[in-house]
Image (tube, grey):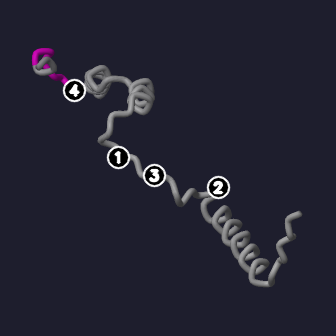
């Protein structure tokens, strides 16, 4: 039969301190913050992140000429081609 662990005042103090720290962290940041997450470099290939970026925005070339012509700028068509 296992012996029951006695709860000391130090254990209660540590537990209360951790709980208070966690609640303050949630209050400051709006959510729990992970302190032991591994930092992932942005230079590393990540197919999931790249696909999410590609679906979120249009190519730059489609937006630029529309903005130029809507502003009333008289640019020749040849200057838009590269």
**Mark identifier at residue 79:** none
Q: Report the residue marked by disc 2.
A: 31
Q: Which residues are magenta?
A: 72-78
Per the image, is 22 magenta? no
The single residue placed furthest to the bottom in the displayed view is 9
Residue under the point 67% across and 71% down: 21
Front residue of 21 and 56: 21
Q: CA distance from mark 3 to mark 2?
A: 18 Å
Picture layout, residue 51 above or below residue 13? above
**Helix, strand or loop for the magenta stretch, by majority:** loop
User: Badge 2 local density, few (<14 within 10 Å), some, or many (20+)?
Assistant: few
Nearer to us of marks 4 and 2 is 2
Q: Report the residue marked by disc 4.
A: 73
Nearer to us of marks 1 and 2 is 1
Horizontal side, residue 53 vs residue 62: left or right: right
Question: Regarding mark 1 in the picture, which secondary structure is present there?
Answer: loop
Front residue of 23 and 69: 23
Q: Report the residue marked by disc 3.
A: 38
Residue under the point 73% across and 69% down: 19
Q: Earlier in the sequence, mark 4 or mark 1?
A: 1
Horizontal side, residue 82 vs residue 7: left or right: left
Q: CA distance from mark 4 to mark 2?
A: 48 Å
User: Badge 1 local density, few (<14 within 10 Å), some, or many (20+)?
Assistant: few
Question: Regarding mark 4 in the picture, which secondary structure is present there?
Answer: loop
Q: Report the residue marked by disc 1.
A: 41
Q: Earlier in the sequence, mark 4 or mark 2?
A: 2
**At which x and y percent is residue 73?**
22, 26
The single residue placed furthest to the front in the displayed view is 1
> From the image, which quarter does the N terminus lie in?
bottom right
Q: Earlier in the sequence, mark 1 or mark 2?
A: 2
Q: Are marks 3 and 2 in contact (CB under 8 Å)?
A: no
């Amino acid at each position: 039969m296992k012996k029951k662990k006695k709860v000391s005042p130090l254990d209660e103090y540590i537990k209360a301190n951790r709980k208070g720290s966690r609640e303050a962290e949630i209050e400051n940041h709006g959510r729990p913050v992970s302190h032991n997450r591994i930092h992932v470099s942005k230079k590393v290939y990540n197919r999931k992140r790249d696909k999410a970026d590609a679906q979120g925005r249009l190519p730059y070339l489609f937006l630029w000429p529309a903005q130029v012509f809507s502003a009333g700028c008289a640019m020749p068509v040849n200057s838009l081609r590269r």
